[in-house]
């Protein structure tokens, strides 16, 4: 079963969240889809050339993994990482403020079948992320039986829109 935490962020919060990863871990970041394999790799959370694709895959390189690439069968053949579901990855979905859809961090854990990495060690990594979010959130809202944590700028935006 996968694990997730609901989170709302702004662009400024995304930069702060990205800094947390770069200062504490040896991570690589990927967008969901791109025209080339090389374009799948991004430098930061605001370095997403296609804002509609608001999911970022975070790979802590402490965990061995080799991405497998495939192309979609759509008219515009886009590359994606085929083995992401069983990989040591955290999926960060950014907040969509236009429709007010909160983001989340998600770990598929063993949802997609057996994994080839140390799940207990990866859980420590995932828990460090959730702890950082909770420590750095300025507020939370209970909605649909779950807590949504708001980082600093997102909390300001949320309160201005109420």
Image: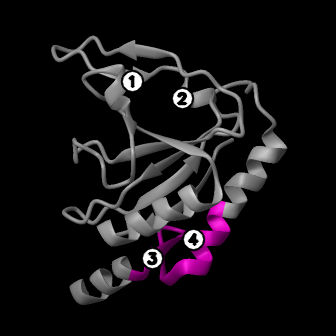
Horizontal side of 70 relative to 90 (left or right) equals left
Measured in 3D between alpha carbons, the distance from the residue under mark 3 to the one under mark 4, in whole angstroms, is 7 Å
The residue depicted at 55 percent of the width and 64 percent of the height is: 20
Number of numbered markers: 4
Residue segment shown in magenta? 129-152
Q: Is residue 75 magenta?
A: no
Residue 56 x, y percent position in the rendering: 42, 45
Q: Which residue is mark 3?
A: 151
At mark 3, the secondary structure is strand
Is the C-beta separation of discs 1 and 2 under 8 Å? Answer: yes
> Looking at the rendered structure, which numbered label has been put on residue 133?
4
Q: Residues within 10 Å of mark 4 (few under 14, many from 20)?
A: many
Q: Residues within 10 Å of mark 3 (few under 14, many from 20)?
A: many
Q: Which residue is mark 2?
A: 84
Instruction: Check the image and report above or below for 56 versus 5.
Output: above
Q: Image quadrant for the C terminus? A: bottom left
The residue depicted at 29 percent of the width and 46 percent of the height is: 48
At mark 2, the secondary structure is helix
From the viewer's side, name the closer residue of 91 and 147.
91
Measured in 3D between alpha carbons, the distance from the residue under mark 4 to the one under mark 2, in whole angstroms, is 23 Å
From the viewer's side, name the closer residue of 20 and 126.
20
Q: Is residue 143 magenta?
A: yes
Is the C-beta separation of discs 1 and 4 under 8 Å? Answer: no
Q: Which residue is mark 1?
A: 80
Residue 102 x, y percent position in the rendering: 38, 63
Image quadrant assignment for residue 36? top left
């Amino acid at each position: 079963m996968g694990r997730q935490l609901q989170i709302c962020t702004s662009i400024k919060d995304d930069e702060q969240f990205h800094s947390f990863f770069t200062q504490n871990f040896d991570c690589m970041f990927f967008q969901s889809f791109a025209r080339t394999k090389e374009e799948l790799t991004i430098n930061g959370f605001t370095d997403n050339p296609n804002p509609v694709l608001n999911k970022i895959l975070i790979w802590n390189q402490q965990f061995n993994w080799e991405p497998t690439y495939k192309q979609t069968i759509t008219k515009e053949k886009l590359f994606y990482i085929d083995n992401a579901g069983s990989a040591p990855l955290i999926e960060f979905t950014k907040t969509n403020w236009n429709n007010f859809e909160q983001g989340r961090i998600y770990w598929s854990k063993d949802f997609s079948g057996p994994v080839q990495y140390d799940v207990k060690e990866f859980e420590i990594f995932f828990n460090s992320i959730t702890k950082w979010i909770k420590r750095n959130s300025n507020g939370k809202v209970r909605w649909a039986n779950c807590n949504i944590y708001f980082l600093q700028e997102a909390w300001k935006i949320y309160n201005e829109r109420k």
